[in-house]
Image (cartoon, helix red, strand yellow):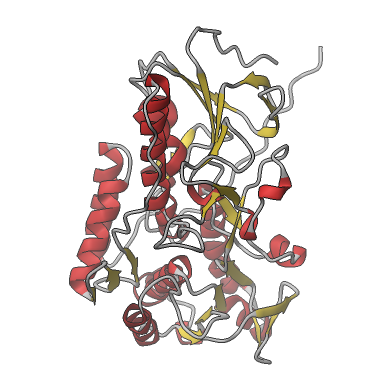
Amino acid sequence: MNPNIPEVESKRIVVVGGGFAGLTLCRDLVKSDYQIVLLDKHNYHMFQPLFYQVATAGLEPSAISFPYRKVFQNKKNVHIRKTEVLSVDTDKKIVHTTIGEIRYDYLVIGTGATTNFFGNKQLEEITHPMKSVAQALGLRNSILQTFENILISECEEEQEGMMNFVVVGGGPTGVETAGAIAEMKKYILPKDYPEIDFNRMNIYLVEAAPRLLNGMSDKSARKAYEYLMKMGVKVWLNAAVSEYDGKVVSLSNGARMKTDTIIWAAGVRGNFVEGINTDVMARGQRMKVDGFNKVEGYDDVYAIGDIALQQNDPKFPNGHPQVAQVAIQSAVNLAKNFKHIAKGETQKQFIYNDLGSMATVGRNRAVVDLPAFHFGGFFAWMVWMFIHLRSILGTKNKVQTFVNWIWSYFTYDQSLRLIIKATQKPKKQLK
């Protein structure tokens, strides 16, 4: 195969990964003199903060996905290739991909993070992560199929495992997912499955730390805990999963319970790229970078977003949080620096401007941390909705998401409870 990228006189920047960081960088360099090559294994951008709503049938996958080619229509200096990066050769300045070799003058790694199972292969194989649209859709299928299976099960012991849902990880994803499933239990599922006694359904949120939302304030953590408890979620703190065989989960506090469904939201690790010196790998498989997001030991390789670990920011000596705003701001700064490089001007170090953080815990409930103050409740929920709507790519997607939210709010219902599974490709006939 040949990537078929035209050779031009302009310097070429190859961007690996089209998440918040990679996409922002490419968009900010559209009008520059650089040739931009964006590599991603998907042909669309995914809005990760709302994966849990796809998984709980609140949104369609298309509402939080946007094709790269739509973003860069008629942008002649941007070339998009759907491919997987196998490795990089930093001496020859080549990226090895599944469609061939791609030369670069500057390489920007924005591969983001994936689910961290902390080395437990068994958990990786039999629990549900949510780091892609496909995984979120798979979880939706699994949740809905579980209740279809309950209807035809005659064994109460078997039903007990089906009726217990365990969410592991008390960060924003875990809190939001547990809250969404609790709302399904209260408002949606009893109407769809009147034959099932939903008093038997249990939702557990398991967190190894002594509090929820470790990256947020104590006030927000307490509020989130209170909201979840009122919604019927059983929150277990200071408890970690020690073993799971697909039917019974054992926790570090000695508790055991039957469950057929574990949703894993307990941590992330960086998608480290083969060929980069492993000496730059820090905790969580992140790449150590300097103040300009340049990977340590390289003059032409940069890392931005969740994969980067910058420790020279005085406010964040242990590195920036792995959130969208860090990815976006670091990409904006790097784009400006590439323009400075082209003009021979002085570059500017990246300093993160913390605009705050938030998490929602079901209808009318959210927590928001701003630099100056913290608040929760209905107003926080409205702020959460506004910020997320503004951040989704595409006017149609914003409208579609808003309409879904309004419909769900007033009708206490969703119309997206479809079990959709891909079929196998037809085999090509041999000549």
Left or right for 69, reference 101: left
Residue 365 picture location, percent across and down: 27, 74
- 292 or 224: nearer the viewer: 292
When the figure is inspected, residue 114 is found, relative to residue 74, above or below; the finding is below
- Return the x and y of residue 67 as percentages of the image width and height: 42, 32
- Quadrant assignment for the C terminus: top right
> Which quadrant would residue 51 be assigned to in this image?
bottom left
Q: What residue sits 36% from the left and 45% below the top?
A: 329
Assign the N terminus to one quadrant of the image.
Answer: top right
Where 281 falls versus 5 (above or below)? below
Residue closer to the observer: 205 or 160: 205
Residue 160 x %, y %: 61, 83
Q: Quadrant of residue 188?
A: bottom left
In the image, residue 10 above or below residue 331? above
* Closer to us: 364 or 137: 364
Foreground residue among 204 and 96: 96
Left or right: where 426 falls relative to 10: right
Residue visible at 42% across and 28% down in the picture: 338
Hey, which residue is sitting farthest bottom in the picture?
A: 254
